[in-house]
């Protein structure tokens, strides 16, 4: 088990309905020392790629992306999930269906902040069915930029997202892939990587 | 002018309706090197305070809070703006009115992540009328924790938020206080600090 899998076993909580709660260290309370290990590990896994910018999506991706960005010395852009009156001008917009919230969101990035030819690393905390990720990829492609890699902290391996993204040929690195969970025993099966 | 005021003059855009757009470096695209300077500066201004935890609010506070947290070696908790099915158990809830979005939000923090006796530093990117801040303060007080300081990146000094929070006796440090803006000339007046 790597450092993240160990932490998930220690502090993650399995709930009915294939819910894995990691809100004590990842997506409500955030352990910045852990985020630094995550940043180091993504830098190791994407050491061959030239990265100009990190793209993530609000809200829980932002903190991780900002710490990861320190290891790549690049700025972060976060996609917004709803139209804000503070965004004007031209925007890239993709429609995204959320697994956790069971609703559709528009994912929005200002055209000013994604440029043709830029090499983008996409970072997010979770991937399940991968809809948010598909929206981000679509926006990067629309901008004429290039998805050089996708770094996910926890992938739900029993849902289709990871398979779809890998089938599409993207370099997807998930630091922990959960292949099964048992809400009664609290057991979590990780995929061997 | 300090480093932040200089950056605001260089890359901020003044729009009609007292809107200051800083989305190229602060709250859409995020300049992590700038965030590190912000972290250093907050650490300097709150060097006398014992801080156990940083509290912020989604979305644009999160990235700054995570980088600032590195200078205090503490975890970050971010308040959520809408009830999520991934939050269960007991929650602190405060009602907050947004200036930018002209709507009411519930600000929510899980009771697990704010404990009696904890010393909290609240960090956010913007303060205008201070409603979000009032919600965060109310939640910290409800938890029996203590607001040791409030660090704001940009305060709109011509709105009431800062005065109210200072009147309440809190140690509020704003790295830039904008006392006036002119959308025609693009001029920005900063308060001498």
Image (cartoon, coloured by chain):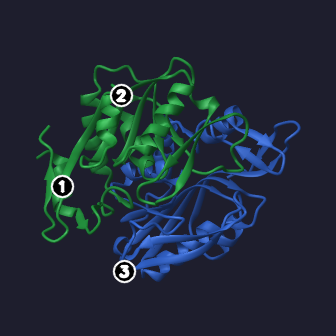
Chain colours: A green, B blue
* Structural crowding at the residue carrying mark 2, measured as other residues with C-alpha within 10 Å and reported as few (<14), some (14–19) or many (≥20): few
Is A23 in front, or is B189? A23
* Structural crowding at the residue carrying mark 3, measured as other residues with C-alpha within 10 Å and reported as few (<14), some (14–19) or many (≥20): few
Q: CA distance from mark 2 to mark 3?
A: 49 Å
Same chain letter for marks 3 and 1: no
**Is the C-beta separation of discs 3 and 1 under 8 Å?**
no
**Does residue B32 show up?**
no
Q: In what quadrant of the picture does the N terminus of chain B appear?
A: top right
Q: Where residue B186 appears, x then y in whole percent? A: 82, 37
Which residue is drawn at the image coordinates 39% and 39% (left, top)? A123
- Which residue, given by chain and number where applicable, does mark 1 sit on? A180
Please tell me in which quadrant of the rendered image residue A41 appears. top left
**Image mark count:** 3
Mark number for residue A168?
2
Which residue is drawn at the image coordinates 46% and 32% (left, top)? A137
Chain letter of disc 1 in the image: A
**Circle 1 sits in a helix, a strand or a loop, which is it?**
strand
Chain letter of disc 3 in the image: B
Q: Where residue A71 appears, x then y in whole percent? A: 34, 32
Which residue is drawn at the image coordinates 51% and 58% (left, top)? A103
């Amino acid at each position: 088990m790597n450092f993240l899998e160990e932490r998930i076993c220690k502090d993650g909580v399995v709930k009915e309905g294939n819910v894995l709660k990691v809100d004590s260290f990842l997506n409500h309370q955030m352990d910045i020392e852990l985020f630094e290990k995550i940043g180091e590990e993504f830098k190791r896994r994407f050491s061959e790629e030239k990265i100009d910018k990190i793209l993530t999506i609000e809200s829980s991706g932002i903190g991780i992306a900002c710490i990861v960005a320190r290891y790549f010395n690049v700025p972060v852009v976060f996609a917004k999930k709803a139209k804000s009156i503070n965004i004007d001008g031209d925007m890239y917009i993709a429609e995204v269906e959320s697994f956790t919230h069971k609703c559709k969101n528009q994912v929005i990035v200002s055209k000013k902040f994604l440029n043709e030819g830029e090499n983008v690393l996409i970072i997010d905390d979770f991937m399940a069915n991968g809809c948010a990720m598909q929206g981000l990829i679509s926006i990067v492609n629309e901008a004429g930029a290039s998805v050089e890699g996708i770094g996910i902290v926890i992938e739900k391996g029993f849902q289709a997202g990871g398979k779809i993204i890998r089938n599409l040929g993207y370099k997807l690195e998930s630091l922990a892939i959960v292949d099964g969970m048992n809400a009664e025993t609290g057991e979590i099966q990780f995929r061997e990587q």
